[in-house]
Amino acid sequence: MSLRVLHVITRLTLGGSAENTVASMVALAEAGYGGPLAVGCAGSDATSLADARRRGIAVLDVPALGREVGPRDILALAGVMAVIRRERPAIVHTHTSKAGFVGRLAARLLGVPATIHQPHGHIFYGYYSHARTAFYVTLERLAARWTDRIITLTERGTEEHLARGIGRSAQYRTVPSGVPTAALRARAPVRAAARAALGVPADAFVVVGLGRLAPVKGFDVLLRALPALLTAVPTAHVLLVGDGSERAALEAQAAALHVGDRVRITGAAADVAPWLATSDVLAAPSRNEGMGRALVEAMALGVPVVAAAVGGIPAVVTDGECGRLVAPEDPAALADALIELGLDEALCAKLGGAAVRRAEAFSTDAASAAMRAVYDEVVREKRLR
């Protein structure tokens, strides 16, 4: 017996939350929990929308559902309510903070039997001012009252929500952002071929940064670490694989630091495997991170990680086992960790081998099984079948 589910997300873009949402929907549909996705198509990436449709997901456009908070949110609420009335889901599953509040309010007003919320991280620090963050936390506390389960990417994510008075511990379940580790390895080229194809020097020590070029990702910290890294490891190169609002600022920063010839910004990549295959280390100097899907993608290919110890990152990267953890906002500490790996090829290989094994805890199979278990639990509790 199948059960109708409506998923709600603000937008689909290249990145962890959208990719995780689509993958979860595919796995849930196979388990009998199928249904459409309500999304603001205007703010979405066309490639991501096409990929969702190609994978069998019915995409329903809610034009007013945008990322920023504003007067149009009333229209977004009305739009989601119209979809709920038409689709009559037994479960509404919301994704990310903005869609999470609008979707849960709509479900509450229309008496949907069960509601699941998946924040895909959080916005408690690293994004907004103190006043704006406090407002969003208040909304999260309110919406938690209307929620049967809140799904966090790591246990640390649960702790950070509870510390701010959002929900009760019994509501929380942890489901990682599943990465198709086996498929990623299968399509990744060997390093020499990848470097030749992408024009990366064969003898370079390559540090890759993967993600949106936004302040929260901390790539400015990586660039500040680069002069010290180059002094110790003259063959070092930095690849920033992504695009975003900070691109021009990062290019200007690299020029001001006189390291522009060692920094390459590639733009967004639909397939990150070739870029990861070129790299020796992934750097993730984030100011906030729900889990860090890019970390798992790198680890699955045997690339050790140097990352800031923020958010859910310490739940993914075990310091000294599959990478190094450093203090956030500390370019000197980041440089020291990168220098250590740049000068010790054997250590790099050792951490990379352990990273491959560690990545499997965050595979698509592991995540899909955990998500199905959450749904089965909610169905039993609410007697939906």
Image: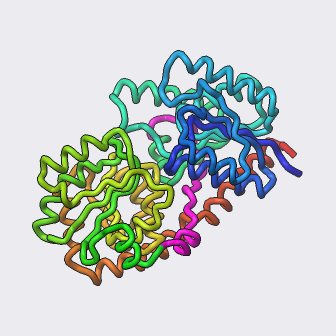
The answer to whether any part of residue 158 appears in the image is no
Q: Residue furthest bottom?
A: 346
Question: Which residue occupies 62% across, 23% down?
Answer: 76
Left or right of residue 211, residue 345 in this image: left
Residue 66 screen position, x and y as percent? 54, 28
Question: Which residue occupies 41% across, 37% down?
Answer: 124
Magenta part of the chain = 162-188
The answer to whether any part of residue 375 appears in the image is yes
Residue 60 screen position, x and y as percent? 70, 35
Question: Which residue occupies 69% across, 52% down?
Answer: 54
Residue 108 within the magenta-colored segment of the rendering: no
**Residue 313, quarter of picture:** bottom left
Front-lying residue, 376 or 229: 229
Residue 2 screen position, x and y as percent? 85, 49
Left or right of residue 179, residue 236 in this image: left
Residue 184 within the magenta-colored segment of the rendering: yes
Residue 14 to residue 349: above or below:
above
